Image (cartoon, rainbow, N blue to C red):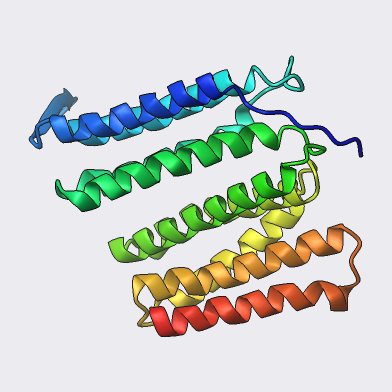
Amino acid sequence: MDTNRHIPDTNRISVLTATVLLAFALIRLLPDAVYTIAFQAFIWVIRFDVDLRLVVIVLASGLTATGVDWLLKSHPMMEGKSTLEHWLVPMLTALVLGMPLYLLPDGALWWVGFGFGGVLLVLVFWAEYVVVSPGDTNYPAAMLVLTVVSFSLYLILAIALRYADIRLFMLLPALFLATLFASSRALYLRLGGEWKIAWAMGIALVGIQLAAGLHYWDLSPVRYGIFLLAPLYALTNLAAALLDGVPLRRALVEPLVMAFFVLGAGVFIG
């Protein structure tokens, strides 16, 4: 594979990051009042409670997708290609970053989260730009960033769903889609741009069976999320190794070792 190195336009990344962070800063300036929108449909009155700060977070997430499209259009290998596959990780990153900034009180901790969010956004934008070209010399580092962020977002979602204590029939579709996204994206990056949806769906099916089995156990939200993350990470890495032609015995080593440490962390941390 020919190697190359493409560096994103720093001006575009700066403008994009600053715009998203400006939206996050706007959260602190908006009133914390909740507005009720109601309308009548036949004999029913439908009401919605709208928090403007949450609306800003959702809009910032959509703005991130638009900004990533604008950023990637400057890549020499993106001419005439769709940028859709590169939207989701930045969108979810902005959404997940926005929620703590919405919940945290004013003070030093909020500013720490604000600064960390800016650094993470820059890393994600840079990584999405780099992975456009599998032959880029920075591809391994960019792949690592996006993989870690994808699995972290999955963990946060699993913890949040457990904390919300939603019904199993609503939990499983959400976790299926999250597992499908995380595993398919990781396989795509590990295999240099090949989608393996069938493998990802198999991993997702195993994941929701484990989620259903653990649903009625007396587990804390953190422990529940970690116990789901460990097999997801292990199966994804095993599938990537097998698809890359690694013999089964060798392919099993890294996933089993990592699963052991992640499950151990769940036992002691959760």
User: Is any part of residue 97 visible from this angle?
Assistant: no
User: Is any part of residue 151 visible from this angle?
Assistant: yes
Q: Position of residue 194 (x, y in %)?
A: 80, 43
Specify whether 106 is left or right of 82.
left
* In the image, residue 104 above or below residue 130: below
Picture residue at 42% right of the left edge, 24% below the top: 63
Among the 4 quarters of the image, the one containing residue 124: top right
| 207 or 6: nearer the viewer | 6
* In the image, residue 18 above or below residue 127: above
Picture residue at 38% right of the left edge, 26% below the top: 18
Among the 4 quarters of the image, the one containing residue 21: top left
Q: Quadrant of the N terminus?
A: top right
| 209 or 35: nearer the viewer | 35
| 47 or 207: nearer the viewer | 207
Picture residue at 89% right of the left edge, 66% below the top: 246
Specify whether 123 is left or right of 253.
left
Q: Position of residue 260 (x, y in %)?
A: 61, 82
| 216 or 182: nearer the viewer | 182
Q: Position of residue 75 (x, y in %)?
A: 69, 21
* In the image, residue 48 above or below residue 113: above
* In the image, residue 224 above or below residue 48: below
Q: Quadrant of the C terminus?
A: bottom left
